[in-house]
Image: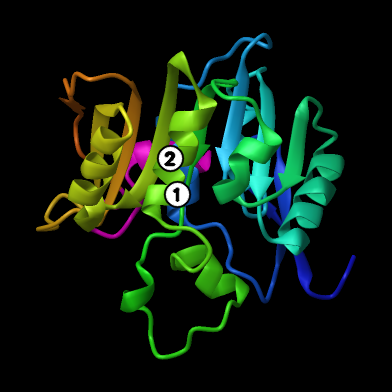
Amino acid sequence: MEDNLRVDTVSKNFKILQKVDHYSMSTDSFLLPYFANVPRSFKKNIIELCSGNGGISIILREKSDAKIEMLEIQEDLVELSKKSLELNEITNVAVRSGDIKNVKEYYKPSTFDYVICNPPYFPVENMPNQREKFNHNISRHELLCNLSDIIQAIRYLVKQNGKFALVHRTYRISDIISECEKNGLAIKRIRFVYSKPSSENSKIVLIEGSISKVSDIKVEQPFYIYNEDGSYTDEMKKVYGIYE
């Protein structure tokens, strides 16, 4: 194995390859597939946008037999995803190199039953002085695509009766709702993630929606990552696949 690669366990049955000098999977990347009500049938189609090293799609294979497609702009991460798929001998999952702003060049409209995405969170103006397009910056900041690009791509790709899911920073919730409304999408489920029960604010939000003009949002129970003593909550253990 290459010196800058490591193997990490991401679920009960699967592992992924990650680059030591790249942005690694975070808690958000585990929470999203746990939250998402993806279709289970092999007759359905799922696409992950901004798929990075492929961890989310690989975790989804634990809960769905659907055909899964990944779209990622960084070539080295596309190749890394392919290696992880080979490592796990996973079938019916493909990864494509491409820019979500050009999604119409790759796919026909209304192609997918479910669209899932863990996008860059932070506007470029929130970046430190450095603006280099290194992997870590691309993964966290809206250098190559922004929230509007993400929502427009979702609207183009999702079927009329399909769904989409996002994980994002809670402080961007008004932006997300606004962009969805502009594009004929509506949020149907929201779950706010807190560090622990005593936390004053939620930093992460999980969102699921569909094509709709009706915003009948269901706000689910809060998700807590830690107990007050710093140990993982029982639900977080489920997310990470920790069984005692």
Characterize the local packing of mark 2: few (<14), some (14-19) or many (20 or more) Cα atoms within 10 angstroms.
Answer: some
Q: Check disc 2 and report the residue beneath it.
A: 152
The image quarter containing residue 11 is top right
Q: SS of the residue at dot 1?
A: helix
Q: Foreground residue, 138 or 12? A: 138
**Separation of residues labelled 1 and 2 (CA atoms):** 5 Å
Q: Check disc 1 and report the residue beneath it.
A: 149
Q: Is residue 199 above or below residue 143?
A: above
Q: What is the three-letter code of the residue carrying label 2?
A: Gln
Residue range (magenta):
225-244
Q: SS of the residue at dot 2?
A: helix
Q: Main secondary structure of the magenta part?
A: loop
Task: Identify the residue shown where x is 71% and y is 39%.
Answer: 14
Q: What is the three-letter code of the residue carrying label 1?
A: Asp
Q: Is residue 231 magenta?
A: yes
Q: Is residue 232 above or below residue 95?
A: below
